[in-house]
Image (spheres, grey):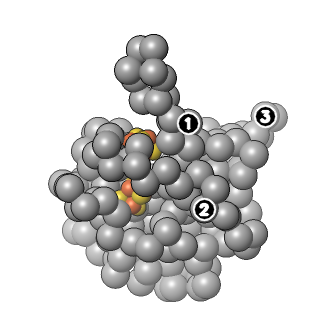
Amino acid sequence: MEKISSKYINTELCTECGGRCCKQCGGIFAPEQFEDLSVEGLVKTIIENNYSIDWWEGSPVPDEERMRTIYIRTRNVDQPIIDPSWAGTACTLFIPGKGCRLSFEKRPLECQCVVPDWDKDTGEYTCIISTEDRADKKQLSIRWLPHQDVLEEVADKLWEYEE
Ligand code: SF4
Ligand code: SF4
């Protein structure tokens, strides 16, 4: 996949903030970040690395009938491996006071493309996910569209695994 530069990294601001984004939800991967996109390969990777199955309700593109569009993200604390609900708990890979367990290159594309920002007038953090890198939730769901048959099988196997 295209290499994402570290142009958005702002260690000073993120250290000051203490990881608000990581305390709310895990980040979404792009399919190009997985070497093995087979059912067996993805099931193994998800279980071994503490990732989760989540989805976009319906289709992220117009004029397409679809119940859901599955993608893979990092797992949230105290949440199941199949986790479409937004519980607002932290990403399991977040270490309070230290940050992400993963090196920048290994982080989900969504995490690599968060642009840290702070509004000096309101004192609010105004970080957004860069759209030019197609790394927001909608664009990442679109990237996962060609893999939906595989991901439905992965979801079936993970249901069995958690039972
Ligand atoms: S990206 Fe924004 S919310 Fe996340 S740690 Fe940095 S400043 Fe905080
Ligand atoms: S993978 Fe790392 S950067 Fe992404 S949400 Fe989890 S702790 Fe934060």
Residue 96 in the image: above or below residue 48: above
The tag earlier along the polypeptide, 2 or 1, is 2
Picture quadrant of residue 144: bottom right
* Residue nearest the viewer, comparing 152 with 48: 48
Above or below: residue 51 compared with residue 10: below
What kind of residue is marked 2? Ser
Q: Is residue 131 visible?
A: yes
Dot 3: within a 10 Å radius of its alpha carbon, few (fewer than 14), some, or many (20 or more) residues? few
User: Mark 3 belongs to which amino acid?
Assistant: Pro
Specify which label sits upstream in the sequence, 3 or 2.
2
The residue singled out by tag 1 in the image is 128
Please identify the quarter of the rendering in which residue 137 is found. top right
Q: Which residue has dot 3 on it?
A: 62
Q: Residue furthest right?
A: 63
For disc 2, the marked residue is 6
Numbered disc 1: secondary structure: strand
The answer to whether residue 67 is visible is no
Amino acid type shown at disc 1: Ile
Q: Residue at x 53, y 55 (%)?
A: 9
Q: Residues within 10 Å of mark 2 (few under 14, many from 20)?
A: few
**Does the residue tagged 3 have its C-beta within 8 Å of any atom of ligand 2?**
no
Provide residue 22's location: percent of width, then percent of height.
Answer: 35, 49
